[in-house]
Image (cartoon, helix red, strand yellow):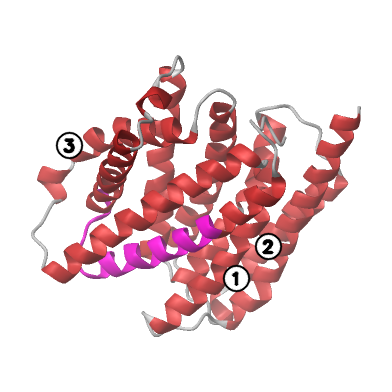
Amino acid sequence: MDGSVAAPRPILALVIRFFAAGSLATMAMLVKLAGSRGVALPELLFWRQAVTLVVLGSAIALTGRLATLRTERLGAHARRAFLGVTSMAFVYGAVLLLPLAEATVLGFTTPLFAVLIALIWFRERIGIYRWTAVGLGFLGVGIVMLPDLGGGVSVEGLAVGLIAGAFVALISFLIQDLNRSESPWSIVFWFVAFTTPALALFLPFVGAAHDPTTWGIVIAMGLAGAVAQLFLTWSLRFGSAATIIVIDYTSLVWAVFYGEAVFGRLPPATLWLGAPLIIGAGLVVAWREHRLSRRNRAG
């Protein structure tokens, strides 16, 4: 299930993933802040991609990396772009519909969905450890979302957050496959090159004038997303999704901090009861994938 890693360097992958988690948490806070100021979801998606395209394109041109964009897998990039922008829509939707901490915790279901994808897509045999982890993880989701203990989370937000977790797991497998033959610059560039024009088609229907502060938030969101996109792709180049995804849990610290500092909200008791189950389940999956990977290499 760990897929193909171009050049395994697990410690470097973990460090890169740590910065990716911080960048993603910052981006999520800015998405929610922009949404509260009237910026529509399709507009947020467009500016996220457009800013990345400008920043990345400039960096590639200035550093003479144009040759890295050559590819013989344009179809694979197109599929990744379609699924990637769909994934982004659900991830951003969860952030807009849910409090930051709850949306972040639902994102932690990604390793659980990765197990299910491995079962369905790769016909992989799933043992008792990973089935137990999946069960405990989704039990944790139920506890986090129990309204009678103070969660107060909408059913729509819960559904969108879970779908986002599944899509992120799927995208991780696709990126690892692309990393076998493509550079991180190429993977991110073709993603934004395909999706930016497509998202621009929505602007006549959802675009609106904003004040300078709101534009600043939107641009900062795009910059944070560009940094996160590169870090995520690089991390999957040096380590498997199953082993490095454990670092994503550090984003909960940022989400709780931003939730209180920016939105004046601390998470309810349900989050502190359910989050350890979800995180623990993810750790079990990561540990089991690491053991299986070592066993396969030894064999």
* Front position in the image: 139 or 167: 167
Q: Is residue 172 left or right of residue 288?
A: left
Q: Residue at the spot x=78%, y=43% of the render?
A: 289
Residue 65 lies in what quarter of the image?
A: top left
Quadrant of the frame with the N terminus: top right
From the image, tell me which residue sits under label 3: 201
Q: Say if the magenta span includes residue 34.
A: yes
Q: Is residue 38 visible?
A: no
Amino acid type at circle 2 is Ile
Residue 195 drawn above or below residue 93:
above
Amino acid type at circle 1 is Val
* Front position in the image: 277 or 81: 81
Q: Position of residue 147 (x, y in %)?
A: 53, 75
* Front position in the image: 114 or 298: 298
Badge 3 or badge 2: first in the primary sequence: 3
Q: Position of residue 112 (x, y in %)?
A: 67, 49
Q: Nearer the viewer, mark 2 or mark 1?
A: 2
Residue 164 drawn above or below residue 143:
above
Badge 2 or badge 1: first in the primary sequence: 1
Amino acid type at circle 3 is Leu
From the image, tell me which residue sits under label 2: 278
Q: Position of residue 186 (x, y in %)?
A: 42, 30
From the image, tell me which residue sits under label 1: 144
Q: Say if the magenta span includes residue 10.
A: no
Q: Residue at the spot x=40%, y=62% of the render?
A: 28
- Magenta range is 19-42
Residues at circles 2 and 1 in contact by the CB criterion of under 8 Å: yes
Badge 3 or badge 1: first in the primary sequence: 1
| Label annotation for residue 263 | none
Q: Secondary structure at mark 3?
A: loop
Q: Is residue 89 left or right of residue 17?
A: left
